């Protein structure tokens, strides 16, 4: 099926309308008519080849929501008209220990990303959600239970939501914990909402003084401007857990120093250039850890969506047309996103 999409032909070209081919649904496939797709900083890193290995044409987008348009003969969990989501994963080996544990993102044989992943379909790599339609194995489709009028604001949960939810759960964040969220962008603003909903004391760290009041409204108990040394110092040795969502290279020592004994700084941002090597002293002398975390598995993504539906949590979004994606990327690079751009896919036909 020929499908309208937006993508780039090379790293230095703007996104443009593209006609792509989607496979006809196989027995296990769900065909999703996409309503909205969030704009993740990973889309920008990939489409502009800031990370190695981008295949072109590149159609980004892994925060997909829409409605089921068709299902294959063996599909049991979904029917035409259902409201569904597709996140960062569309396949994995299903045989390794990680897949067995529902941690498809850590598949030993390599998961298939929603874009830029290996596939038998044309053109040999997956094409993402900046498109009117996608065909996905039923095992990688999520159910959306939020009210219909929140659908656009649900889209970012599929990456920004799960990428922050998963480490908060893994490190058992809850009442009595002091938690830091670094960077108030797409991921960070969800981290604030989720950590607050889990009952933690939340401190937001930002380089943008102008986001202070927003961060408090999102659920932060306190906001620290990270460029202010005194404000930072006041929190030395006090955090159980810090989640760092920053998309650019920066000094990690400033954050490890804020952890308690046995505290963890978990990195989820994947900057184009590496962070300066952290000092071992602050780690060794308080048994502090630096860790990383990748999105979340399908089971946990459904759990996150249900948690958000139950707690009335959605993303703070600014809706854009497909024609404006490059302008949105430029604003994202200036940390000027409040707090996630979402593409109205209906604009693609215009
Ligand atoms: P985003 O919306 O651009 O937010 C990043 C935030 O980082 C900015 O809003 C800004 O917040 C802060 N920031 C930017 N430049 C900075 C700098 N030079 N120094 C300090 N802070 C800076 O990006 P996003 O979509 O949330 O993604 C964040 C990162 O996570 C990206 O690298 C993305 O690729 C990665 N990611 C990882 C995973 C995973 O599974 N691990 C999943 C999705 C995305 P303030 O204005 O508050 O300072
Ligand atoms: Zn993402």
Image (spheres, grey):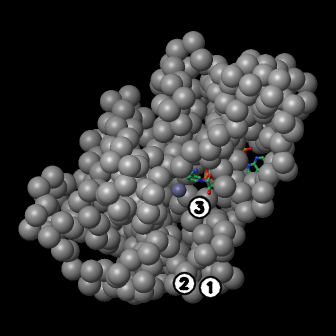
> How far from the left and from the top, in percent, is residue 348?
41, 75
Residue at mark 3: 42
Is residue 87 left or right of 252 when viewed as pictured?
A: left
* Residue drawn at (54%, 84%) of the image: 56
Residue at mark 2: 56
Cβ atoms at labels 2 and 3 below 8 Å apart: no
Tell me the CA gap for discs 2 and 3: 16 Å
Furthest residue in direction top, as rendered: 176
Q: Against 162, is 331 above or below?
A: below
Is residue 283 left or right of 61 when viewed as pictured?
A: right
Q: Nearer the viewer, residue 211 or 256?
A: 256
Label 2 sits on a secondary structure element that is loop
Furthest residue in direction right, as rendered: 229
Q: Nearer the viewer, residue 209 or 242?
A: 242
Label 3 sits on a secondary structure element that is helix
Tell me the CA gap for discs 1 and 2: 6 Å
> How far from the left and from the top, in percent, is residue 42?
59, 61
Furthest residue in direction left, as rendered: 73
Residue at mark 1: 10
> How far from the left and from the top, in percent, is residue 41?
61, 59
Tell me the CA gap for discs 3 and 1: 16 Å
Cβ atoms at labels 3 and 1 below 8 Å apart: no
CB of mark 3 near ligand 1 (< 8 Å): yes
Cβ atoms at labels 1 and 2 below 8 Å apart: yes
Q: Callout 1: few (<14), some (14-19), or many (20+) C-alpha neighbours within 10 Å?
A: some
Label 1 sits on a secondary structure element that is loop
**Quarter of the figure that contains the C terminus:** bottom left
Q: Nearer the viewer, residue 258 or 328?
A: 258
Q: Callout 3: few (<14), some (14-19), or many (20+) C-alpha neighbours within 10 Å?
A: some
* Residue drawn at (38%, 49%) of the image: 97
For the image, the number of numbered tags is: 3
């Amino acid at each position: 099926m020929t499908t309208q999409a937006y993508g780039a032909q090379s790293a230095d070209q703007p996104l443009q309308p593209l006609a792509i081919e989607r496979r006809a649904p196989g027995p296990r496939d769900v065909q999703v008519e996409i309503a909205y797709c969030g704009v993740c900083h990973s889309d920008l890193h990939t489409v502009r080849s800031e990370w190695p290995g981008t295949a072109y044409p590149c159609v980004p987008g892994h925060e997909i929501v829409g409605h089921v348009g068709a299902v294959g003969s063996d599909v049991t969990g979904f029917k035409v008209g259902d409201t569904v989501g597709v996140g960062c994963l569309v396949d994995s080996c299903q045989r390794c220990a990680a897949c067995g544990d529902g941690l498809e993102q850590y598949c030993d044989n390599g998961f298939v990303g929603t874009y830029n992943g290996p596939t038998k379909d044309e053109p040999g790599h997956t094409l993402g959600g900046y498109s009117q339609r996608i065909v996905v194995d039923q095992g990688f489709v999520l159910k959306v239970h939020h009210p219909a009028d929140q659908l656009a604001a649900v889209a970012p949960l599929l990456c920004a939501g799960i990428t922050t939810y998963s480490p908060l759960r893994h490190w058992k964040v809850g009442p009595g914990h002091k938690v830091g969220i670094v960077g108030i962008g797409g991921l960070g603003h969800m981290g604030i909402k989720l950590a607050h909903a889990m009952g933690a004391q939340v401190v937001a760290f930002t380089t943008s003084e102008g986001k202070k009041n927003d961060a408090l409204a999102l659920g932060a108990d306190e906001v620290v401007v990270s460029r202010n040394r005194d404000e930072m110092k006041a929190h030395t040795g006090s955090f159980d857990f810090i989640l760092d969502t920053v998309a650019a290279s920066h000094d990690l020592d400033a954050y490890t120093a804020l952890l308690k004994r046995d505290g963890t700084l978990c990195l989820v941002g994947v900057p184009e250039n590496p962070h300066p090597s952290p000092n071992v002293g602050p780690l060794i002398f308080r048994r502090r850890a630096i860790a990383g975390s990748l999105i979340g598995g399908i089971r946990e993504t459904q759990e996150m969506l249900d948690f958000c539906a139950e707690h009335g949590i959605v993303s703070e979004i600014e809706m854009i047309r497909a024609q404006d994606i490059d302008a949105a990327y430029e604003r994202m690079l200036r940390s000027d996103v409040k707090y996630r751009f979402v593409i109205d896919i209906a604009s693609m036909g215009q």
